[in-house]
Image: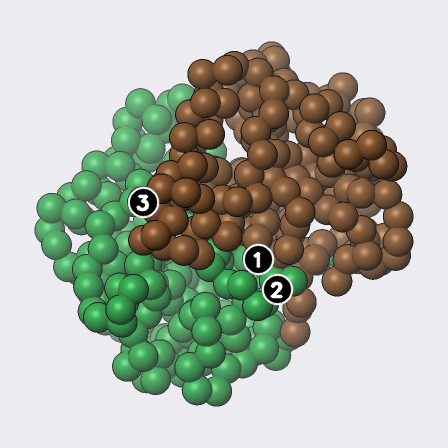
Chain colours: A brown, B green
Amino acid sequence: VTARRVALALVHYPVLDREGGIITTAVTNLDVHDISRSARAYALEAVFIVHPVAAQRELVDRLRSHWTDGGGARRIPDRKDALSLVRIVSSYEAALAELAGGGQAPEVWTTAARAHGTVEAYGALRERLAAPGRPVLLLFGTGWGLPPELQAGADVRIAPIVGADPWNHLSVRAACAITLDRLLGAWS
Amino acid sequence: VTARRVALALVHYPVLDREGGIITTAVTNLDVHDISRSARAYALEAVFIVHPVAAQRELVDRLRSHWTDGGGARRIPDRKDALSLVRIVSSYEAALAELAGGGQAPEVWTTAARAHGTVEAYGALRERLAAPGRPVLLLFGTGWGLPPELQAGADVRIAPIVGADPWNHLSVRAACAITLDRLLGAWS
């Protein structure tokens, strides 16, 4: 249970490639579906799809419309509940501004497969979310993840997910689901 | 940490459609990628892709070969680690037989978005996995999930995932990631 407003942003730029260079990735339709469904299940306020290229933003807009107003909405209504959370922005700064909405500036919480600097554990972060405070924007990177500069400037760097093995190459869809469950899920 | 051999099976038949009828679903490439990556991160022994149609099994075989022996294996070696777990079978009974391998019959643990009969909580199941016992086959259904008869015959029905809301329409990729994390993850 959270006392904060929580949203997530799926970042397509700036993200890393395999060699650590900065790239822009293409939108993957299934990311938008899976991540908005996970966000809905964990009662997030919004899912920001961050892309600097207008044609890619239009693609996401068409996808969203199909499922919120078009044939998809009639055929599978629960998909409408999920896709309705999607907001399309050109930068993560724009996502921050929208989430602030003229009020308190959100905290930026970054996710990564490997620790960069000091990271915070899930138990402590659940407690922080349960107490009143600024809105929180959870950042997820596509490609090979968020660049170090973005991690360094974050308010919170969430601890990498440790499975049962040091091997850590989860999909962003799986990492997002697990992160939301660890931060917000009702375990038993 | 588990003292048991644990594998999962992604079932394409028999599964439910929206109206509760029994159908066969088509293979989704990204299911095979995401679920094998999650399985590798949580140190599972195998991922059985269950499909009764030979042409669909051949499709999964070509996908797997590309990533374990072909161009994909050279380009992204960590994908090879994940896809190497994939085994292709025509029924979930065949998956059980392969996992048994002439030894103890595995327990069948089913997953579902809604409770069917008595379900067991994650904390208790973590303890069961930590103690020696028979191998465990975790069953995940595509489409609208596993049929009631299959749930009824299971050794364990795992509790539905509760997010922060009664809304529960996670993708099978997200549900699989969260289930493995709750059963086997190193939380902190």
Q: Which residue is mark 1?
A: A41
Q: Residue at x 52, y 14 (%)?
A: A53
Q: What kind of element bears circle 3?
A: helix
Q: Chain of mark 1?
A: A
Dot 1: within a 10 Å radius of its alpha carbon, few (fewer than 14), some, or many (20 or more) residues? many
Label pair 1/2, CB-CB below 8 angstroms: yes
Q: What kind of element bears circle 2?
A: loop
Q: Is residue B37 above or below residue A152?
A: below
Quadrant where the image shows the C terminus of chain B: bottom right
Q: Nearer the viewer, mark 3 or mark 2?
A: 3
Q: Chain of mark 3?
A: A
Q: Nearer the viewer, mark 3 or mark 1?
A: 3
State the residue in front, A67 or A51. A67
Which mark is on residue B165? Answer: 2
Q: Which residue is mark 3?
A: A71
**Count of marks overlaid on the render:** 3
Name the amino acid, label 3: Gly
Q: Is residue B109 above or below residue A180?
A: below
Give the Cα separation between the discs numbered 3 and 1.
23 Å
State the residue in front, A132 or B50. A132
State the residue in front, A69 or A132. A69
Which mark is on residue A4? Answer: none
Q: Residue at x 19, y 41 (%)?
A: B59
